Image (cartoon, rainbow, N blue to C red):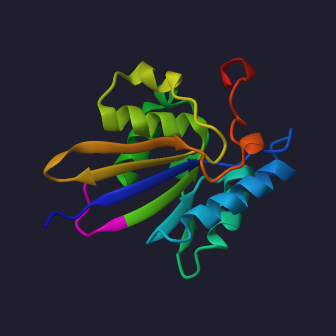
Amino acid sequence: MTAVRHLWIARHAEATRDQSGLSEAGERQATLLGRRLAGVPLTAVSHGPLPRAVRTAALVSAHLPGVPVRPAAELDDRIPDEEPAASAAMIARFAGPPSVETHELLITHAFQVGWFVRDALGAPDERWQSLLPCNTGLTLIRYRRDRPPQLIMYNDVTHLPPELQWTGMPVELRP
């Protein structure tokens, strides 16, 4: 049987205006995301270095006892096509087929979520810009050696009550 990499990717929870931490809504979002993921056999949690990603990872990991949590500079908030080497390093580290079965969670930023999805779909570089995940929107991509990447879900916010589901989205795009 071919090993599968299950790459779970979530945008950080809603940040405070000054980006120094999470808002009250963001604290709730991160806690609810942790509860949602409690039954997933995660092998690791990696997060970007900015405070909003660090705090989100801490709140999520409180529901994942024994799962290692580590910072990952590759998951920093950058514009992917303006820093191609950084984007390539992010994909090289976290995407692609594994040698053993894994379920890894990445807590990162909207641009990076879009870049992972664009890469998995083999879409042109500029297509990441149309992918706008909500705060704590959950994406799952599966990688195997014997087939192209599979986008299983994108921007799932069913773990959130309606009033928390569309944060991070421009008002004109909210349903």
Q: Residue at x 56, y 49 (%)?
A: 10
Relative depth, front residue between 85 and 58: 58
Camera-side residue of 156 and 53: 156
| Residue 100 part of the magenta segment | yes
Left or right relative to 166: residue 74:
left
Residue at x-position 43% and y-position 72%: 41
Q: Can residue 109 be seen in this view?
A: yes
- Where residue 129 sits: x, y (%)? 52, 23
The residue furthest bottom is: 66
| Residue 94, percent from left and from top | 39, 53
Q: Quadrant of the N terminus?
A: bottom left
Could you tell me which residue is drawn at 42 percent across and 49 percent down? 140
Who is closer to the viewer here, 85 or 119?
119
x and y percentages locating residue 112 in the rendered image? 52, 39
- x 74%, y 22%: residue: 171
Secondary structure predominantly adopted by residues drawn in magenta: loop
Magenta residues span 96-102
Image-quadrant location for residue 63: bottom right
Find out whether residue 68 is within the magenta segment.
no
Residue 10 relative to residue 58: left or right: left
Is 71 drawn above or below residue 172 in the view shown? below
Q: Relative to residue 175, is residue 110 depicted above or below?
A: below
From this view, report whether residue 33 is shown above or below residue 85: below
Looking at this view, is 149 or 93 the one in front?
149
